[in-house]
Each structure stands twice: as structure tokens, then as C-alpha cells.
Amino acid sequence: MFRYIVRRLLQMVLTFFGATFMLFALVFANQKDPIQALVGERPVSESQRIALTERYHLDEGFFMQYWYYMKGLFTGDFGTSMTGRKNWEMMADAWPVTLRLALIAIVIAATFSVTMGVYSALKRGGVFDNVSLFITLVLLAMPIVVIAPLFQLIFGIELGWFPPTATRDATVWQLLLPAIVLACIVIAPEMRVTRTAVVENLRADYVRTARAKGLTRTRVIWVHVLRNSLIPVVTLIGVDLGGLMAGAIVTEHVFNIPGVGFNLARAIKTEDGPLVVGFVSILVILFLFINLLVDLLYAALDPRIRYE
Amino acid sequence: MPGKAPWKMAAGATAIALLAAGCGGGGSEDSAATSNTVVIGIGEPQHLIPTNATESNGSEVLSSLFYPLVDFDAENKPVVVAAESITPDSKNTVWTVKLKPGFTFSNGEPVTSENYINAWNYGAYGPNGQGASYFFEKIKGYADLQSKDPDGEEGPKKAPDPKAKTLEGLKKVDDATFTITLSAPFAGWESVMGYTAFYPLPKAAWKSEGVIAEGFEDAIIGNGPFKIKGKWEHDSQIVVEKVADFKGEAPKVDGVTWKIYQDQQAEYADLVAGNVDVQTQIPIESLGKASADLGDRFKKSPNSTFQFVGFPTFQKEYQDVRVRKAISMAINRQEITDQIFLGSQSPATSFVSPVVAGYRPDTCGANCVYNPSEAKKLYTEANGPKEIKITYNVDGNHKAWVDATCNQIKAALGINCVGGEEPKFADLLSKVEKKQPVGLIRLGWIMDYPLMENYLGPLYSTDGSSNYYGYSNPTFDNLVKEGSAAATEDEAIKKWQAAEDILAQEMPVIPLRNGQNVYGYSTKVNNVTVDLFQKVNLYKIEVVG
Amino acid sequence: MSDLNTVTTAEAPGGQPNVPRSPVKKDKPRSLAGDAWADLRKRKIFWVSVVMVAIVLVMAAWPTLFTTADPGACALSNQYKGPTGAALFGFDYQGCDIYAKVIHGARNSIVVGVLSTALAGVIGLFFGLAAGYFGGWLDAFLSRFVDIMLGVPFLLAGIVLSNRLSSDPKSDGIFAVTLTLGLLSWTSGARVMRSAVISAKNQDYVAAARMLGSKPSRLIFRHIVPNSIASYVVLLTLLLGINIASEATLSFLGVGLKNNAISWGIMISEGTQFARTEPWPLVWPALFLGVTVLAFIMLGDAVRDAFDPKLR
């Protein structure tokens, strides 16, 4: 186990470099005129263009730009954004609020989808199963660009149940509505997968054995069946963070949260290479950790899986 | 290996992750709503160094921190504010500025003529890359502060340092007086100095000569009625509080929180919920309910925005002036401003905004009047293209009106019309530079200073900075220049109007709409006005009760 | 778990004559597909979803069967007018006939949704199988690649791909959107497949088959895939819905369909803007999208249930 974790951590270092390189290439491929992108519709004077081109090494080739970036990284310098702020500072500002938002969303999504998925599976074909299927599908069929403003409108403005916007140091209460919006995009898949897995496991031999041994139905379902059904669900929750981050671009925009999604969208728009790479590299590291966690959970959920 | 171990490790790791995320939050203390302060919504400013602040968010925040040399009265004529007097010589070339005595920066430094000269030199010096440096273009010696890349932008050679570091045309007379020498006579210079770029900077701004101290921008010090409390909290807010012994006109509120929004609809939601007191631009999506939500706290006032489409001169199919006129006549401007913009903009029938002196309504004449039958006739005569395209940037909310305009053109001319979508304005420009067939280009202009010349020069002159479509007419260029050099403003306006008449003949662009401020405020505030530059008047606004 | 011996195909291990063949029942040798079909025919939900999917597909293929109106003929003078004879659903913000637009929008939405999901399904299947079955360094490499892919923001990849792919100004961007969605949405499937394979590979029957000398390809496609594909199929049907909806997000970000292409996604995102005052332009396309996704998911569920030997 220990060796396995060490190996994974070593892989992470390599992956990190692979990721920054790939991202840099993507951003570079997309870079047309970051100076114009920065000023929007204003005209750019020639001397301003020369000054900015030199400051951000924009006239140099891809490998040189990558080199400058990596050189900075090794000295602990994440570079300077095209907006003139330090990338490190911007990331430190943006990450905490997004992490909290994503965490709340994951907790909401996991709680709902697992309980509803198990219940649907037990009452397969019943009213609850069909109604919950329909509701989750309606949510699924709604793009996030619809759900986010609609929820803000209905629950934030018309009904006034939640605050319509949040800030950088928002409380859990302020983040609840955007978190529900984010959870909506992942609830349907998670719930369907839970339901499918539980349905399958309900027919497994061990369930019959356990019941025959005289265990209560509740115990069999919530301990034995659920544990065996969680592998695909846990996997999905792990990767759903990706969906959440993509959703965060829209959600943070709508709810005015100055987090990662918002910063990333702005950085992409202004062709701000170092900033995009900075944010996404951290994102990739996050995924690496989460997926390590998920892989460890596999072994926990299914004792037959061994890592060495 | 014990079977239970992975459980514990996973649980432990999850707990750490949860803790780490939870700790990030920290105490969220609501900015204690001290009674006499207001919250005004803005977007994140790009910069707060005055010579680099070219967009409205930055200049709005700066207007609370600085006291300008000149401001504009109800007729948009310049009036001195921080200056005692501004006097030109007989040829309008040398301007003498005398400062009012006794003013200080909020850190206690006295305001002297050097503060102005140093700030402007910094702004004009090419290698500093300041966005508003073009404002100093008219001052003598500006060219010596610019560097030219000897082998073009792509070339490997670095641009040499400019010849000079300071503007030849700026001369200190004494601590309260300085002179500005222009490279050519310009009667409207006083108006130009009303812009954000002409604010002074204190000694505290400089690390060494010509280098701004690190961190100064985030806690900028000005000579205005308010000072920054703490620091610029990026993407979140900028809190300013009253300067105790301010010598100029005192505002009625004790402080302003500039709350930063990424999205106007989110800002509107907060306006209705009472979390923000003033929104200077209510988005179209919310206008339908604005009267119901806000009642008489929903207001309109003119601003200088001018929306139009340009015909790229490199596309041969639009060379015939009859084609351009026909397309213009096929557009029902009133219907679009009423139904797409819900009355938040008004039809444009001239080539400059109604807010500048010298504006005449309907200079575009019959060309800007909706007349589908005449349009069709003219278009068929000229044998115009079977399909036209209006290219726009999708990040600026232009799709709705472009689609509507296209539908009108389709119906009137019986041709196909499509909207060409580009992710952002820079993408559009790069296509224009490569002379790709973009069709009509969506453009807009917000004035820098209230003069006709600020529309005619940048938009339609051969070397105009925003003349992306390549219109060029030497007679027009000369008239604009003659106007700028005229001895009096009336003479200048005559020349400029003659120039505008040429545009009406040639229709290089189609004027579409003039913008308005559609703003709203909460029940907490009163006396809210929004000026031509989309700024809230901070000296008038007050807190109710 | 009796299917070990019932599956017999042409590629049966010829070199291993000692593999025990099942004592085929005398009366009727039935294949897996034959069994599934017999099972499906009896399900009501299967037929309902088949009819619904068929209607949508016909709508996508021959929209003019449903409406003769030109969806591009819009006039502001019709803005938000209620339903009239031909325009069953009334008119939208631009004064377009909502019914005609919904019918004509089906094609782009379905094409983008189905093709991108198919692409994602294939990529995800192979990544998941390879990583899960072979394990070791291959798994490490593929899994870390998936991690990187997960991190790449949708917006960035969308912009890059659509810029690279649709340089033709006349293109409607369908190819670019399909490829973008397909290339970005396979990752969750790959991970689910991988985990299903890992857990299936440790099952006794797989070990048994391996000991009996099955080749890896047979092991994978005859034993592991059928036993681990259930969650994957469910995920793919959901992905179809997500991808149809995501097309709207891409359009919203300015890298979606171009040149006045109509799709449900675009209609929905446009309808959302003014939903507070005029809800119908949002409701109709959303309803069609919802029902279509529902039909595909029900179909997927039914087919999966029928094919899954464990559920018989």
C-alpha cells in the first residue's frame, strides 16, 4: 500500500509537467493577439504594443515562452498575469471560495443521489422511481446556462429564499444556491448509476446468503448492497469534480463569485497564458489527488482489490 | 496487509481535504453598514493608474479618489475644478494651467505642478505601455517618447529606447503653475484635460524617477474627496472613505463601496434584493421588469455611446455607395431600439453623438430613414451582393440586435443575411487585418472628451485609431484638421459639420443607435444622476433619512 | 453465472480442443441477442421509447413533414405573439415561429448529441478497458492522461478546437462542436469502465476462464465487457442528454454552432434571457429536449436490462 502511494505521488510529478506542457501548447495555439484581447475594443498604440510584447515575451516562440514559465515555477514564481497582478496572488484569492463551493455541491449531490438511487432501486418501476427519473432528467436536459440564471431568478429574486449573489468570503448559506445549481448537473448521472448498481447487487448471491443468515433487510441493503454498489458511484463523484469546474465557469459568473471558474474564463478570454496554465495545473493536481483517493476507496469498498 | 487500512487512509485524506477547504473561508465580516455610505456596482477595473485607466470602471473609481483639472457643465462645456484657471495663448498652442492653492493628496502631500508633469510624462513614455498614452499625442515632443520596432513586430530585434523621457511641451513655471505646449493649435484642449489620464500623482507613487512603486496601484493615493480604505480587493470590492479636510466641493456621503460584479444580471439581482444601491447600467434582460421592480427609481439619462456598422473598403461588393445606402434604408432602427433594446437606446441618424456641441439631428438624411421599397429599388439597381454578413463579437451581447437587423434586411431586400460570430473583439479585428470577408463590422464608440472631433478623428479619419474599415477621404481629413486648428470653438464646429456632411454623402458606416444610461437605485439613496461618461455624480448622491 | 459456456462464436478457441463445450440444449440454441430480443418484445416501456425515438429521428431527417413554415422567416412585428394557425407555439423575441424552429432545430441537436456521444463512448470504452484490464504502467499512463483531460477547461478546449476546425467561414460548426464534445466527454466513462473492469477482472468466473486458457481478447469481449458494461451504458445514455445540452453552453460561450444554425440548445439559452417576462420561448424547446433525452434513456435502460445476463 505504502509503495503504491509513493509510486502514485511520483507519477503526479510527471503528470504535472505533462499537463503544463499540454496546456501551454493549447493556450499558445489559441493565442492570436493577447494585447488587443486585453484592451477590448480600444485601439492599441504601437508603443504600447511594443512595451507589452516585450514584458510578456509575446514575440518569442513557444518553447522559449514555456521555458520562461518553468524557470519561474522553479523559483516559486507563478508568473505575472496580463492584468499586471501576480498569478500566485490571484490563485490564492480564487481557490478557497471555489473549493468550498465544489465541496458543498459534492456533498449535496452525493447525499441526494445515493439515497434517492438506493430508494429508486428498491422500488424499481414504482412511482418514486419514475418521478425521480423524470425530475433528474429534466435537470439533466437543462444546460447550466439555463439552470443557473433560472434558479437565481426563482429562488433568489422572486421567492427570496436565498441570497441572489455571493462574495469571496461567502458563508455556507450564501453558497448554498450556487452549490445546488452545480449539484444539479451531476445528480442525474450519479443517481442513475447508483440505482443501476444497487439493482444489480440486490440479485447477487451474497444478498440471498445474508438474508438467509437472518440479517435484517435494512442492514443488508445499507451495509452489504450499498458497499458493493458504491464503486462506480465513487468513481463518478471523483470525476464529476471536472464537470463541477466546467459548470463553475457559468455558475460563478451568474452568482458573482470571484473564484476559479470566473478567473479561468477571463484568463482564456484575454489569452492570458501563464494564468490559464497556473489555474489548470492546480486543477490537474487536485484531480490527481482525488483519483488517488478514489482508487484507495476501491480497495476499501472491495477487499478483493489489492494494490502493491 | 490489514483489510481495514485503506478505509482509514481514505477517510483521513478526505478529512484533511475538508479541513483545508473549510479553513480557506475564514471569518466573513459584513462590511458594517455605517449609515451614511453607499454601495455602487461596477465591473472589475483593468487598472487604477490614471494614465492606464481607459475603461469606465477604472475611471469611475478614480473619479472618487481624484479631483480633476476640469469638469463639464450641463452643456458639456469645460469648467475648471482643481485648476484656478486654464488660459490658452492667442493661437491655442500654449496653455497655462494655474492650480488652486491649498490642495493636498490624501496622504498630506501638497499638490504641485510637478505632480501633474511627472504623471503625464510617465503616461506618455512609450515603454511604460500606458493605455491612455494617446491622450498626450497632441503635446509637443510626444513622438520622441515613443519607440519604433526597427524590423516590425515579428522581427527579432528589440525596439531601441525612445529619444527622450520627458515631454518637451510640459514646463513648470512655479509650484502652482505649468504650461502645456501643443504641437499644433487646438481650441478644444481644455475639454481633453477633463479625462482621467490628466490626474496628478503624489511623490509617494514613485519608487524612483519614472518608476511606479510596487503596490501603489492597489492602494492608490489621489487628490480627491475620498481615499481608499485598505486595498483594492480585486474582483470583490474597493472601499473608499471621505477625506476629512477636503478643500474642494464636499460630497454628501461619508464613503462609497465600489462593489465589483462580473455580470450585470447578478448586479441587478442584488439591486432588487437591496445589496447594492446604484446600478448604472441595467441589462436589457432585466428591463422588462425594471419599472415594476424599481418604480420611479428606474431612470434614464443620455450617454455618449454611438453604435454603428462599418463597411470594410477591401470588400469590393460594398464599393457602390448605393449598396451602402440601400442596406441602411432597409434597417428599421426604431423597431430595434423599441423591441430589442426595450427603449434603452435611441435610433442614431447622425455620425456623432447628440451629447457633443455641434451635433445636428438627421445629418444622415433619407439614408437613415427606414424605407424598404426605396431600399429594394436602389439595391437592385446597384446589383448588390446576394448575401451579406454582419460580423460581431459574441461576448458583448450583440447577437439579438444583429439577428433582428438581419431579419429586417432579409425582408426588405430579399437577400440572405447572416450574423458572423467571433468569440471576442480581438478575433474580429484579426480577421479584418487579414482582409477576410467579414462583411459589415459591428462597432461602437464611447467618447473620451465631449467634442465632435472625438468622433470624427478616431472613427473616420484616414489614420483614425478606430477606423478599422479603412475609410479614407483627404478632403474629410483636412476639414477635421482645420476644425481642430480653428481659433474659436464656433469656427471649429463649422468645419467639423462640413466634414460630417461628407460622411452623409459617402456612407462609410451605417449609424444605428445612441446609447443611454438606464440606471436604477435602491430606496436607501436619493439624488442619483449618471453622467455622459456613465459615472454616478458622487457630489450629489445622498443617503435617505 | 452460467453464461460462461453458453456463448459460442466463430472465433472460438480453435487451438484448444479441450475447452469444454456446453451441452447445447437440444430444442433451441439461442444467442445472447436472441434472448434479449425475446425479452425486449414483451416490454411496454421499450416500445414506448422506440416510438418516441423514431418520431424524433424522423423529425431530424425530414422536418418539412411537420411544418412548411420557414424557421428563418422572422419579423420583429410578430414579437411574442401568441399561437396562431400555423405557428402552434407562438413567436419568440425575434418574432420567429417557435414551432418551426423547434422542428428544424431537432436535426442539429440530435446529430451533435448522438455523434459526440458515440465518439465519447468508443474512446472511453477502449481507454477504460485497456487501463482496467492490463493495469500496470499502461493503467498509470492512461489514468494520468485522463486526469489531465479532466483538468482541461471545456471553454479553452472548445475555443481551440472550434478555431482550428472551422476555419471555413461558411461552416455551421457542427463538425467542430461534435468533435469538441466527443473529445471532452469521454473521461468520466473511461473511469467508470476502468473501475468496472477492475472489479470484474477479480471475479471468479474470469479467473476460471483465464485458467481455462481463454485468450485476452476473448476474456475481455466475452466475459469482462458484458459483465461490466451495464453502468457504462446507463452513463452513455445520460451523456447523450448532457451533450445535447452542452451544445447550448458552447453556443453561449461563442464557440458553438454558427451562421444562424438552429438548435434546441441555442433556443434554450436565448429563451432563458427573457424567461422572467416571456417563458414560452424557453419552455417549448426545453420540453422537446427533455422528452428526447428521456426517450433515449428509457431505451438504453430497457436494452441494458435485456442484455444483462445477471438480470434475467
Image: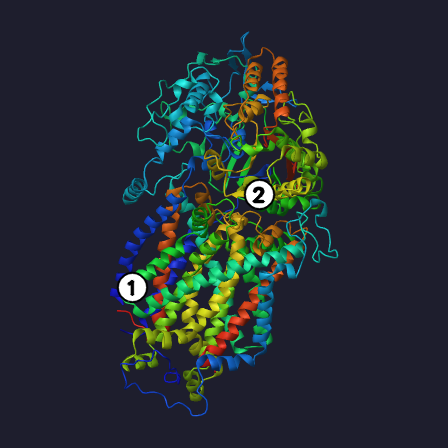
Q: Residue furthest right?
A: C85
Which quadrant, please, contains the N terminus of chain A?
A: bottom left
Q: Disc number at residue A247?
A: none
**Where, by quadrant of the figure, is residue B329 drawn?**
top right
On screen, C104 above or below B239? below
**Residue at screen point 41% across, 53% down:** B23
What percent of the width, then of the height, locates residue B176?
A: 48, 14
| Tag 2 subunit | B
On screen, A300 above or below C213? above
What percent of the width, then of the height, locates residue B349?
A: 67, 29
* Lateral position of residue C267 relative to residue A170, left or right: right
What percent of the width, then of the height, locates residue A11?
A: 28, 58
Which quadrant, please, contains the C terminus of chain A?
A: bottom left
Q: Is residue A108 among the parts visible in the rendering?
A: no
Comparing C299 with B519, the one in front is C299
| Tag 1 subunit | C
User: According to the image, label 2 marks what residue?
Assistant: B419
* Circle 2 Cα neighbour tier, 10 Å, few/some/many (<14 / 14–19 / ≥20): many
Q: Given this view, does label 2 or label 1 mark the residue nearer the observer?
A: 2
User: According to the image, label 1 marks what residue?
Assistant: C138
What percent of the width, then of the height, locates residue B21?
A: 41, 55
Q: CA distance from mark 2 to mark 1?
A: 47 Å
